[in-house]
């Protein structure tokens, strides 16, 4: 993997492990060279609960990606998720020395450090400090203060942090293979890199990434991240409800959810049935379609309403000029966009990765948004490294692990 334009994204999800190999192009697009997958075991609600088993699954997905892309993978960008992740907005402030009035990169780094000088749980570590806006001597809306003259530099940041050991477990799982970890990235932030255009971020947008065990979310207003987090609810919960409610095996419930499930109620014929054919260990059964749809509808509604309550704690939902973009494997459920529109009272769209090409099935499949987004994140880091907009601030996570 000597080519500096080659980048690899790894998502260790609850339902699947996904590895995407991409090549950055000069025009800012990404060519997807290959996608590796493996069923996920040893992961629950986005977090590793069986280290050895999860590591084997990651290895399978990496080997699969290497074979499909004809690339030897040496390092990866890794997504992290889990309800332990938290975020908040905070302002940093520094005053320049009396003998200097030109702002330089040291000042920008110092104001970021100042913004992180807040009390977070002792077991937590900072994951991202995402710049929102700079202010120089009271002047608002400064995009890049380096080189400007001023005495007081302020900066608003969106800060994401999580339990250090849980993030370390993800890193160790990869490093044991052995692969180098270039960076760890909140999954919702990664997805937003390819699901949203810059114009949509400018106008305001909410990305909801619904996976198997978790739902990541990230809200942009005025081109900056204002809210983000992870809800421990995903597609596996819907499958479990179907299995329990209809008394069918989990595997059949998953297949039924994907092929027949809908979030929309009242659009099927009264008494309309779905025939489940007999199989080894399963005698077959008839399922009422409206009952299936009711189960799916109620669980997805619960997730959206929980998320809306979180977002309503602040007022940024009122600033979403382009609405809601739903991605992840669960976004393929029929009618999920209409249910989101009903609950959030905003336009909603099912979205997949943009500005990418290559393996068409991967580019157009919402379940790969996070892994492809990691490649895009890597591309931004490579081309925009001097500004360090995202910042590699996870160095301490590696302490004692080498």
Image: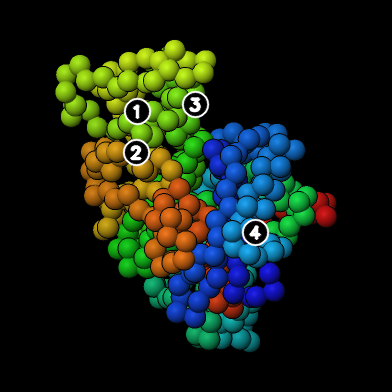
Q: Position of residue 225 (x, y in %)?
A: 43, 58
Is mark 1 in CB contact (under 8 Å) with mark 2? yes
| Residue at disc 2, secondary structure | loop
Query: Which of label 1 and label 4 is nearer to you?
Result: 4
- Secondary element under disc 4, as helix, strand or loop, is helix
**Image check: 61 left or right of 293?**
right
Identify the residue at horizontal 61%, vertical 56% (top origin). Answer: 65
Q: Which residue carries the number 4 mark? A: 66
Identify the residue shown where x is 67% and y is 47%: 60
Above or below: residue 275 compared with residue 337: above
- Let me know if residue 365 appears in the view: yes
Q: Position of residue 95 (x, y in %)?
A: 57, 74
Q: Earlier in the sequence, mark 4 or mark 2?
A: 4
Label 1 secondary element = helix
> Mark 2 or mark 3, which has the lower sequence index?
3
Q: CA distance from mark 2 to mark 3?
A: 17 Å
Q: Which residue is mark 1?
A: 296
Q: Residue at x 32, y 59 (%)?
A: 204
Residue drawn at point x = 68 percent, y = 62 percent: 73
């Amino acid at each position: 993997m000597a080519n500096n334009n080659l980048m690899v994204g790894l998502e260790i999800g609850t339902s699947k492990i996904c590895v995407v190999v991409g090549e950055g192009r000069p025009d800012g697009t990404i060519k997807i060279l290959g996608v590796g997958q493996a069923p996920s075991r040893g992961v629950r609600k986005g977090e590793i609960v069986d280290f050895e088993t999860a590591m084997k699954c990651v290895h399978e997905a990496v080997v699969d990606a290497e074979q499909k892309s004809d690339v030897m993978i040496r390092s990866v960008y890794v997504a992290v998720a889990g309800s332990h992740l938290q975020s908040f907005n905070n302002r940093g402030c520094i005053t320049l020395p009396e003998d200097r009035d030109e702002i330089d990169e040291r000042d920008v780094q110092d104001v970021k450090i100042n913004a992180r000088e807040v009390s977070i749980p002792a077991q937590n570590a900072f994951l991202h400090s995402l710049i929102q806006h700079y202010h120089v001597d009271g002047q608002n809306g400064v995009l890049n203060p380096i080189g400007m003259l001023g005495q007081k530099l302020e900066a608003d940041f969106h800060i994401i942090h999580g339990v250090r050991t849980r993030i370390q477990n993800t890193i160790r799982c990869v490093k044991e293979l052995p692969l180098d970890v270039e960076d760890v990235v909140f999954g919702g932030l990664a997805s937003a890199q390819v699901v949203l255009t810059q114009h949509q971020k400018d106008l305001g947008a909410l990305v909801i990434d619904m996976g198997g065990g978790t739902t990541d979310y990230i809200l942009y207003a005025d081109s900056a991240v204002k809210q983000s987090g992870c809800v421990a609810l995903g597609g596996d919960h819907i499958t479990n409800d179907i299995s329990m409610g209809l008394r069918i095996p989990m595997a059949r419930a998953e297949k039924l959810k994907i092929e027949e499930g809908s979030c929309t109620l009242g659009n099927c014929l009264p008494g309309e049935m779905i025939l489940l054919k007999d199989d080894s260990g399963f005698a077959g059964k008839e399922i009422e379609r409206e009952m299936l749809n009711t189960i799916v509808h109620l669980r997805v509604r619960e997730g959206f309403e929980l998320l809306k309550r979180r977002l309503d704690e602040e007022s940024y939902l009122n600033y979403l000029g382009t609405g809601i973009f739903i991605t992840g494997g669960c976004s393929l459920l029929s009618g999920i966009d209409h249910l989101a529109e009903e609950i959030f009272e905003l336009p909603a769209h099912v979205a997949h990765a943009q500005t990418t090409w290559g393996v068409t099935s991967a580019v157009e499949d919402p379940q790969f948004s996070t892994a492809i987004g990691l490649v895009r994140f890597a591309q931004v880091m490579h081309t925009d490294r001097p500004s360090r907009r995202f910042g590699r601030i996870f160095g301490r996570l590696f302490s004692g692990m080498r």
